[in-house]
Image (tube, rainbow, N blue to C red):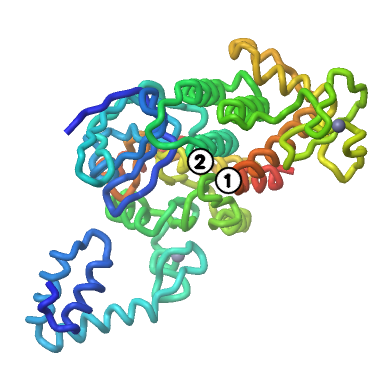
Amino acid sequence: MYHYPPSVLNLIKHLSRLPGIGEKTAERLAMHILKMSRRDAEQLSQSILALKESIQICSMCFALSDTETCKICSDPSRDASLVCVVEQPGDMASIEKSGAYPGLYHILQGVLSPMNNIGPDDIHIKELLARIASGKVTEVVLATSTSVEGESTAGFIAEKLRSLPVKVSRIASGVPIGGDLKYVDQVTLRRAMETRHAL
Amino acid sequence: MALFSSPAILIRRLDYGDFDLIITFLTYEQGKMTAIAKSAKRSKKRFSGVLELFSLLDIVVSTSNRKGLPVLTEASFSRSLNHIRGNITKTAYASYWAELVNDTLEEGRQQVAVFELLDYALKTLDVGDIPDEVLSILFQMRLLTLSGLCPNLNYCCTCHSDMADNNQYKINVDLAKGGVVCEHCTPYSHAQRCLARGTIKQLQWLNTCDLNKAGRMRFSPTAMRESLAFLEAFVPYHLGREPKSLKFLRRLRLQAE
Ligand SMILES: [Zn+2]
Ligand SMILES: [Zn+2]
């Protein structure tokens, strides 16, 4: 490895910091980039920079977005009376892929976690309650993970929503206990969304 | 390669990379043990979602002489907790107890009494026939005792006079000295931490009673508040830091007020 010149070693070092990439894979990727045309390499590096420069958080749902309100929130064909609450942007992506959900989202950007001292004020629960209180929403689907902490977060939010005139439902079983939505297959997720049950 | 199997309570779960989990168990056979569960997050078949906080599991772990963590090879539910999941207050108490166990125990030393205490506390918290707060008082008193840190409630920490002969209504507590102090050694003042005589009796009873009878204990709201405040100050003082779950619990209580 150390026979490479510093510029190559540097790239390998940075690539190997990415999740799931070991030194061997990083080396292979670096060799591949070396063989790329100058144009392709430029596009790759520019897309990384553009991501860091243009990405913002949707002011309504806290999804990643290139604009102030994201594509889903500003899409008139989406059902704005329905809001699905998820932990992370990746969970929203999984539900979108399943194609079973016509409404909007609310991304908490985390989950209540006593062992990490992540409390109700540290994730976007207040914003959710304000959004629901403003009136357009008639149903909230809680799609936090099925882990102990995900379930407790759902329970906490359901309790807070009790006094508001909305129907609250929980994504149905089929998502395995301890399940991270990211790894649930599309069929299971679609079924879980369609057979959600009232809380 | 050696295989080791034991009943185990899952007390900590950390993501490791995209697919793996690093899990700390309180095992019956070997006390605290940390192992890696490979592909646990991705594969449903592998551990079929049993690797949940506070679950009582039957686990098989493979330990080898090579460096690196033991590897979890099998895990199945012995008991899952259906009411703790979904209830943030119960989850917070369970997290606090699990964190205390994780912080006070050494790896690899069998601690059957601690295992039985945590198992009892989680099981009872889930069923809910004893108030969560009373269980937490019981758990903290007994864990302190098992760790050799039981607060001294019997005699004055300074002059050793017997508290049974003391007829003050409120008795002062000195965290640094590890227990109660008589009024001659530290005159009572409101600024100081103190416990009512009746509360002290209740703490002592919870610490030694037959666990099947613990549910009979009735705390007045004042005694409950006093006991929790005392133990939740005593524990961090002797641990040298405040557990994160305890901070969370305090914030949750403030919100509920
Ligand atoms: Zn949005
Ligand atoms: Zn004294």
Local packing at callout 1 (Cα closer than 10 Å; few below 14, some 14-19, many 20+) is many
Determine the residue located farthest toward the left in the rendered image: A35
Instruction: Specify which label sits upstream in the sequence, 1 or 2.
Output: 2
Q: Is residue B238 left or right of residue A68?
A: right
Which residue is identified by label 2? B103
Local packing at callout 2 (Cα closer than 10 Å; few below 14, some 14-19, many 20+) is few
What amino acid type is highlighted by mark number 2? Asp
Q: Nearer the viewer, residue B199 or A175?
A: B199
Looking at the rendered image, the disc whose residue lies closer to the viewer, 1 or 2, is 2
Q: Chain of mark 1?
A: B
The location of residue A137, given as percent across then percent down, is: 54, 53
Which residue is identified by label 1? B243
Task: Determine the image quadrant of residue B209.
Answer: top right
Q: Is residue B77 left or right of residue B66?
A: right
Residue drawn at x 41%, y 56% as measured from the top left = A88
Q: Is mark 2 within 8 Å of ligand 2?
A: no
Q: Is residue A40 left or right of residue A56?
A: left
Residue drawn at x 76%, y 34% as measured from the top left = B225
Q: Chain of mark 2?
A: B
Q: Is label 1 in a helix, a strand or a loop? A: loop
**Displayed-image quarter of ligand 1:** bottom left
Q: Is label 2 in a helix, a strand or a loop? A: helix
* Vertical arrangement, residue B76 with respect to residue A140, above or below: above
Q: Are marks 1 and 2 in contact (CB under 8 Å)?
A: yes
The location of residue B23, given as percent across then percent down, is: 36, 40
Task: Determine the image quadrant of residue B159.
Answer: top right
Residue drawn at x 13%, y 88% as measured from the top left = A38
What amino acid type is highlighted by mark number 1? Pro
Is residue B12 visible to the viewer in this orientation of the structure?
yes
Measure how far apart labels 1 and 2 are at the Cα level. Answer: 9 Å
* Vertical arrangement, residue B153 with respect to residue B89, above or below: above
Is residue A160 visible to the viewer in this orientation of the structure?
no
